Amino acid sequence: MVPIDQLERILDVLPDWIAAEARAVKDSLEEIALDIGRIPHYWCGAPPVVAGSQPFSEADLANIQAKLSSRYQVSFREDGRVGIGGTLHRISAIKDRYKSLAGLTIRLARVVEGVADPIMPYLLQADGVLIIGPPGVGKTTFLRDVVRQYAQQIGPKVVVVDTSNEIGGEGLVPHPTLGSARRLQVPTPNYAIGETFQIMLARTYLEALANHGPQVIVGDEVGYPEDVAVVETIGKRGIKGIVTVHGRTLRDVLENPVLWPLIGRPDLPGRRRQGRPVFSMALEVRGKGRFAVYPDLAEAIDTLLQGGQPEPVILGAAEGKPRYSFERYRKLVQAAREGSLPSLFIEGMLLDYFVLSQAARYALGDSGALEALERAYQLQETASAL
């Protein structure tokens, strides 16, 4: 498991006993649930949930608020969230009916460089990508790596609209994982003059489009009529949009009327599209590192409208994936030596340099290099199939 990014900065604001319990399961820890008067629970990605040793108290909650304020000068926003500048961790509030804090949900972030490698050959050729997945499957982690890899190629021409600061983290300076991509935060609305979060989000997309000359605009959790309308506009102005939406499958998007403008405004009774989708490709995130790709989104929507089931391209890690010996990669290494691999980037390096460096690691006795060679192998295979 990839280590939690800047773990001690988030544990620093927790009571000592909770921090100690979190450290005990840090290798797999993803989320901490804290409710006043109840035992803490530590979610480690799969059942069973790890239970704490004693109830979380009002004093513990007050202690966390005081540390956030004194050490990081932050407090909970109107959306019930707070973060620590320079990190990707998220603390979300649970409130009672009187809007008083009653508990916290703490999401711990990992930076997983290379998670988007199997998909990048498709992304680089697509005219916009719709990323679909439910909460908790790694959409945002995947999206950060997509931003990082695009930024390696076109730098500040990648503009991120950070809906709730989950892509680039809290604070004025975005997290280093975004590289040279630029990040726009969504301003807090002034409700007194009729502003809403949805209006401010849509304005931020328009600002990104009009003011910063992007070639790629990236957004997370598109789902309001206002931001859907602007994303539709972006796609029809020749700008590549890469956005995520909630859902498990492409069929869920088809059954969500708010999202219809993004997929060609389907006419369900007539079993046809009324226009072309904003994106040329769709991608389902089916789990951490597991993806289903629909390279032709229009064709996939048409198949669904006709009652069929489009066949996606399955990429990434599979359950029970076999371990391979170095023999599997000899031809790959030889191609790298000859400089005949595709000019693709993986973890910040050209593919041939990456393969040679991993082969050297293996020759020095590091068996973990085989996993890296497998990622390179899959990337090369995907590129060859296109």
Image: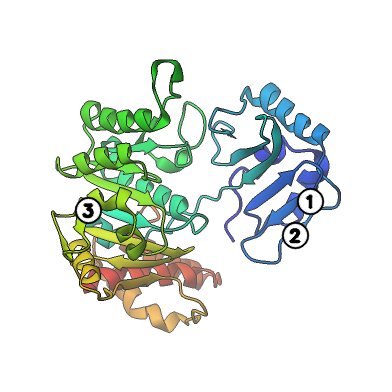
Say left or right for 82 vs 384.
Answer: right
Q: Which residue is mark 3?
A: 279
For image coordinates 37% across by 57% down, the residue present is: 132
In primary-sequence order, the first of circles 3 and 2 is 2
Q: Nearer the viewer, residue 222 or 124?
A: 222
Is the residue marked by circle 3 packed among few (<14), some (14-19), or many (20+) residues within 10 Å?
A: many
The numbered dot on residue 10 is none
For image coordinates 76% across by 49% down, the residue present is: 40
Q: Position of residue 34 (x, y in %)?
A: 72, 45
Q: Are marks 3 and 1 in contact (CB under 8 Å)?
A: no
Residue 335's place in the image compared with 147, above or below, is below
Q: Mark 3: which secondary structure?
A: loop
Question: Which mark lies nearer to you, 2 or 1?
Answer: 2
Q: Which residue type carries mark 3?
A: Phe
Residue 242's place in the image compared with 101, above or below, is below
- In which quadrant will I find the C terminus? bottom left
The numbered dot on residue 21 is 1
Q: Which residue type carries mark 1?
A: Glu
Residue, far right: 54
Is the residue marked by circle 1 packed among few (<14), some (14-19), or many (20+) residues within 10 Å?
A: some
Q: Mark 1: which secondary structure?
A: helix
For image coordinates 28% across by 31% down, the residue present is: 208
